[in-house]
Image: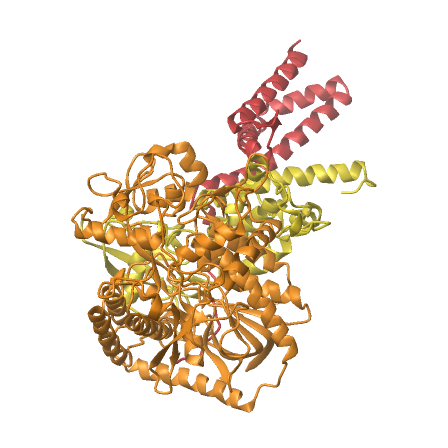
Chain colours: A orange, B yellow, C red
Amino acid sequence: MSTFHDVVVIGGGGAGLRAAIAVAETNPALRVAVISKVYPMRSHTVSAEGGAAAVSAADDSLDEHAYDTVSGGDWLCDQDAVEAFVAEAPRELLRLEHWGCPWSRQPDGRIAVRAFGGMKKKRTWFAADRTGFHLLHTLFQTALSYSDIVRYDEWYVTKILVDDGRAYGVVAIELATGRIETITASAVIVCTGGCGRVFPFTTNANIKTGDGMALAYRAGAALKDMEFVQYHPTGLPFTGILITEAARAEGGWLLNKDGYRYLQDYDLGTPTPDPVLRNMELGPRDRLSQAFVHEFEKGRTIDTPYGPVVNLDLRHLGAKLIDAKLPFVRELCSKYQNIDPVTSLVPVRPVVHYMMGGIHTDIRGATSLDGLYAAGEVACVSINGANRLGSNSLPECLVFGNRAGRAAAVFAARYRQAVPSAVQAMARDEERRLAEELARHAEGHERIADIRTEMQTTMENGAGIFRDGDSLTKASDQLHELRMRFAHAAIDDHSKDFNTELIALLELGFMMDVAESIIACALQREESRGAHQRTDFPRRDDERFLAHSLIQRGADGTGRVSYLPVTITRWPPGERIYGR
Amino acid sequence: MADEITLEVARYRPEVDSSPVMQSYQVPLREHWAVLDGLTYIKDQLDGTLSFRWSCRMGICGSCGMTVNGEPVLSCATFLTDYAPGPVRVEPLHNFPVIRDLVIDIEDFMAKLPTVKPWIVRDVQSPVEQGEYLQTPEELEEYQQYSMCINCMLCYSACPVYALEPEFIGPAAIALAQRYNLDSRDEGAAERLEVLSSPEGIWACTFVGECSAACPKGVDPAGAIQRYKLTAATQTVKNLLMPRSKR
Amino acid sequence: MTASTGRSYRRPIALFWWLSRRSYLLFVLRELSAVFVAWFVVYLLLLVNAIGDGAPSYARFVDWSGSSWVLVLNLIALAFVLLHVVTWFGLAPRAMVVRLRGHRIPPPQIVAAHYLAWLLLSAIVAWVVLR
């Protein structure tokens, strides 16, 4: 079966819904569909906590937001993209406000802002500490008012159909029935989010398996800066649940086992009782997570059954402030850690949180394939460079979701074209492949979970906060081995009805692609920059690597890495300075 | 503490079962393990054919609602140690058709939700260039509680009215309508009145109160419905007395 | 892969579902209380009618009311009406948000106000009747 929509959006999170609305608004004559493997309001945007950055205060400026972003990203950001981003972010957040987002307010009714890591001014809008949840539900509910937006809820895309360098739609499975359908389109926008599940310990939801990155990669699009994986410094041990940076922005301290604010030892400033912007606990995430590793090496962390931790101290903030500004943190700590942050220290450790890299797009969200767009965490424009600043990702979803939606709408209206027969044949091949895969894996003997766990461990050991040539080479070899074993992965579930084991298998296949591209890019980048820290190349090397790595899939299935210069407009590479 | 606990899980495979059957699994009993961790352990190590939904495992995405020992709960926020020594009975949420194992069909809710217009309705949209609509913290507090709904469906599962009258719009949808009615930026209350005050709307609710007891986010849909009953009744009386006045 | 049947399972509703939970039982009893509230209305109308028809009619009504089955019925009805009132009052603060000089009146005070009003009305009725 085959259905046509002018624009198909894969993913129903912040970027996907924003893109769909943008298509509907740009050209109401276009038929737009959102395909999501979960109901849109379940998307991982829901878990974002701290806030969304956009210049709004009188003492702030777009230039300052841009500079914070560029320096936070260790000069790997494309500065034209950053300038567009900071300029459009306020408008996007205001639009969300008009759509009903319950932003926290000042007493006079204006939007309130809070401090955030790596930001020199207070410019992070927030809805208590459930910003992502409110943002997603506002978008989802607003999208309901556009009756023209068709939704494929709980459909899983297995392939992007590409012919002669142009995208023509997707093949997808309906989870509830196992029905496989070809959904053709004049333009496809990938908004599937990140790939944190490639690692063992992550804040990312179970659904964050890098599907969109792998889909685009297999379709022939380039992935960019895949070696840059962000570790958030404060996750709860065992669960990996995120304790928002807002906890530190409101005045929380990080203490080692001696109760010492250890960040002062890592060129992040001097401790003050009240939070100071771009100082100590309000430094950028990469530097804070790296400091944790050094503390561990010095034996100054605390051992727990779930690995070494340090403590986040919120006690001095008091119950009143915590309940007003950080109610979700308190709820999460009490439910999942059995502690009350009002009276107890919160054990935390760095946790994989965000993918700076992703599908290579230009400033309009266009990928290297015609008719294929990407936005949100799955994409790499890049405004995040080598390290994303907290609270830049939500506005990125909105700004570039909107941009990709508009660009795709224009493209779809202009280049309406019959689907070539080659694409139809390709769709049939994909349907056949899925059936064959199932039959083949029914004979398999390797547990999906075992391969997945080993892949995750491999990634943690090989491409963690610190890497080197040896660890990466070893990881590359191990992934190769796992790839062999993956061919023999077993599927016990032969049902068509809501077959989650089949989905787990397909997801694992996608994750292996993503894992390999992370390792390949990390191996080639012989320098240390932002979240990519090579102990064998500890310095930043602007001579060789002030460039984005691009990885593309060759005919033999292996990735080839090349480099693309970084766009510098107004901020020449400089030293990242925090706390002084 | 014993190091294992039994999970009795409802299995329903439509192509072989005519009704659910219970299947027992032994899973490790560990501190911090949620019922959901037990289920993923089964899926990963014991039986790959068990199907259930889950995603964020931090109680905010609303995917993993299940009936555990008879109570509708989020399985990611319900802990095995609280049920020791077990066994723990895990079933799909009640009052919904079961697609497979622990997976329920929520299309009914998804179809009802847009009918209450859960979005900002305004006569005149002012351009974003003019800045935000002002809203004081007090005005925000007025609807904040009702904006916390994660659509997890626990309230529908707890509601006997929904069980008996599937036409009932239900707790979450009405609470979300109230969330917008009470938002100082919204002007759509009149448009929502007809659907909400229909027989399938608020008047179907008989205030059992179990929806509010089941809600993991403290939304209090029962309160929202009762509050709206008062509003709707007042409005009806007003319309009777002053038929010509607008709204 | 086996074919999807597209057949979902609907759990039948047990006849005694309302016994499975205290709150369900309470809810069914409260629903039932409406019958007894209606009975009190009927009873009141009968009383008014009897008074209107003169002293002999009223005397017959009083005799009838004294019969044991009417007494029992009225006692049961009273219990149900009390249940109705108590649950109704309990719900009041969730249905009404009352503001006084910009501050929301806390729920217990709203409940208290209801009981106070009830007491006051009862006192007035008692005063009229017993005067």
Note whether A243 is above or below A564 in the view shown.
above
Task: Give percent across and percent down for residue A144.
Answer: 60, 59
Quarter holding the N terminus of chain A is bottom right
Residue A366 percent coordinates (x, y): 53, 72
Can residue B236 be seen in this snapshot? Answer: yes
* x 49%, y 39%: residue: C26
Indicate whether A482 appears above or below C98.
below
**Left or right: residue A43 compared with residue C89:** left
Q: Residue A198 appears at what percent x and percent y?
A: 32, 66
User: Residue A417 vs residue B54: left or right?
Assistant: right
User: How many numbered markers are drawn?
Assistant: 0
Image quadrant assignment for residue A498: bottom left
Q: Residue at x 51, y 62 (%)?
A: A15
Residue at left 49%, top 85%? Answer: A427
Residue extending farthest right: B244
**Residue B62 in view:** no
User: Closest to the observer: B203 or A429?
Assistant: A429
Residue A224 appears left or right of A414:
left
Towards the viewer: A300 or A121: A121
| Residue in the foreground of this view, choosing between A423 and A151 | A423
Q: Position of residue A391 (x, y in %)?
A: 45, 52
Q: Residue at x 29, y 81 (%)?
A: A487
